[in-house]
Image (tube, rainbow, N blue to C red):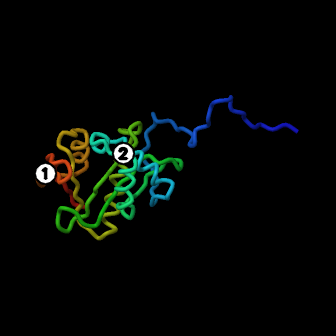
Amino acid sequence: MTTNKQVEPAGTTTPAVPPFDTTRDFTGLVKFATPTDDEMQTLSQLRSSSGPWKDRGETPAESMEALTKLRPYISVGKVDNVVVGYVTVERDGPVPGASYMRNIVVKSELRKKGVGRQLLDQSLKVARDMNRKTIALRVDPANSSAVSFYRANGFTTVATVVSKKSGKLRLLMSREL
């Protein structure tokens, strides 16, 4: 009897998740779910390796602590069951009566491939499901690609605020749903 079992050469490991083509457009492919326990570890790695947390030196353990508090508000984006990003949306935030998008994080190799737009669309859906009419967020004005992304998607600046954590200026942006 013969089998088609592949044998890995000594000293190599098989990746836990098969890679997919990161050159393709991911528009319409992202599916959303609440995070599983296993995915929380993946999300903490993703957060700690992305700005602004990476710039602050946040460790994966610190990211896990922060994300655990946010867990009820997290929507995980997946393509082919692989985490490609996440977004957190809370019912209340700095703008009275508006939901608050606290985080939107896309795997770095998947940026500018339609994933961020789908995460944003998910945040708008979640805010509508909360019976909100407006969604707000804070963004570093030096992050010009993020500011441009939000403006292109209907957000306007309503104020400039100082971050309690970093002491740096942030744009407070919002948009109607």
Quadrant placement of the C terminus? bottom left
Q: Position of residue 14 (x, y in %)?
A: 61, 37
Residue that numbered label 1 is attached to: 162
Identify which residue, 165 or 87, lies in the foreground.
165
Nearest to viewer (mark 2 / mark 1): 2
- Label number found at residue 59: 2
Considering every residue shown, the one lying at the far right of the view is 1
Q: Which residue is rendered at x = 34% and y = 57% of the image?
A: 88
Question: Image check: 161 left or right of 25?
Answer: left
Residue 149 visible? The answer is yes
Q: Which residue is rendered at x = 36% and y = 47% of the image?
A: 47
Question: Type of residue at label 2?
Answer: Thr
Number of residues whose C-alpha sits closer than 10 Å to that of mark 2, classed few (under 14), some (14–19) or many (20 or more):
some
Q: Position of residue 3 (x, y in %)?
A: 81, 38
Question: Type of residue at label 1?
Answer: Val
Q: Quadrant of residue 48?
A: top left
Q: Which residue is rendered at x = 46% and y = 36% of the image?
A: 22
Q: Is residue 132 above or below residue 61?
A: below
Q: Is residue 90 above or below residue 167?
A: below
Q: Position of residue 26 (x, y in %)?
A: 44, 43
Question: Image check: 109 left or right of 120?
Answer: right
Identify which residue, 109 or 168, lies in the foreground.
168
